[in-house]
Image (tube, rainbow, N blue to C red):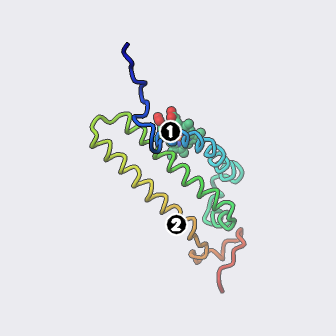
Amino acid sequence: MVTIETPRSPRSRKGAKWEKWGWLYMRASGVVLLVLIFGHLFINLFQNGIQAITFAFVAGKWADPFWKIWDGAMLWLALIHGTNGMRTIANDYTVRLGMRKFLNVTLWVVCFALIILGTLVITTFDPCSDPSVNQIADISIHCGK
Ligand code: HEM
């Protein structure tokens, strides 16, 4: 009797099953992203309106650690989710191994750089770096002097 290997079955049962964890991550992060993204859109656009999104609005929001954590989680989860999704697409459509490797490395390097930059923006944000911030009436942040 001829036995045909199940398509996509792991070659080895040992070691970390990255594809399985990637598959699970896409579903788990998708559920959390639904809450984070639609909450973000609701608060920013629906409740306040696009005109209200100013430097002062962001400064006011980020004065509260809750929104820093919200935005940070959205940044990390969406970037890793999007990059892993693009990796799947690249793996599906590339024929040459060299091109596949190049695209995968590029994707993760860009993802890593954006996560570092975005995290730095959120964690080091200082509303007082803008000298005109004291003239903004609708935020109660007092800078120096
Ligand atoms: C609203 C929240 C989101 C949900 C519920 C969600 C859900 C999912 C799920 C379940 C998959 C896996 C599909 C599959 O394996 O067949 C997926 C794939 C993907 N997602 Fe998301 N996602 C969300 C947000 C995002 C965001 C913000 C990005 C971009 C940064 C993104 C980019 C991708 C990409 C590129 C894929 C791969 C598509 C493919 O395999 O054909 N998603 N998403």
Residue 47 position in % (x across, y down)? 72, 51
Identified at 57% across, 67% down, the residue is: 123
Q: How many marks?
A: 2
Seen as rendered, the residue at the extreme top is: 1
* Residue type, mark 1 in image: Lys
**Residue at the far bottom in the pictured view:** 145
Residue at which label 2 appears: 120
Question: Which residue is located at x 70 percent, y 69 percent?
Answer: 139
Along the viewing direction, whichever of 95 and 34 lies nearer the viewer? 95
Q: Earlier in the sequence, mark 2 or mark 1?
A: 1
Near mark 1 (Cα within 10 A), the count class, few <14, some 14-19 or many ≥20, is: few
Label 2 C-beta lies within 8 Å of the nearest ligand 1 atom: no
Q: Which quadrant of the view contains residue 65?
A: bottom right
Is 133 drawn above or below residue 53 in the view shown? below
Vertical arrangement, residue 63 with respect to residue 67, above or below: below
22 sits to left or right of 64: left
Amino acid identity at mark 2: Leu
User: Could you say which quadrant of the image residue 122 lies in?
Assistant: bottom right
Say which residue appears at 67% left-offset and 52% top-offset. 49
Foreground label between 2 and 1: 1
Query: Where does the N terminus fall, quadrant-wise?
Result: top left
Q: What is the C-alpha distance between the residues marked 2 and 1?
A: 31 Å
Q: Please tell me the numbered disc located at residue 20.
A: 1
Q: Of helix, strand and loop, which one carries label 1?
A: helix
How would you rate the neighbour count of disc 2 (Cα within 10 Å): few for under 14, some for 14-19, many for 20 or more?
Answer: few
Rendered view: 39 above or below 129: above
Q: Quadrant of the C terminus?
A: bottom right
Q: In x, y percent, where is residue 30? A: 59, 42
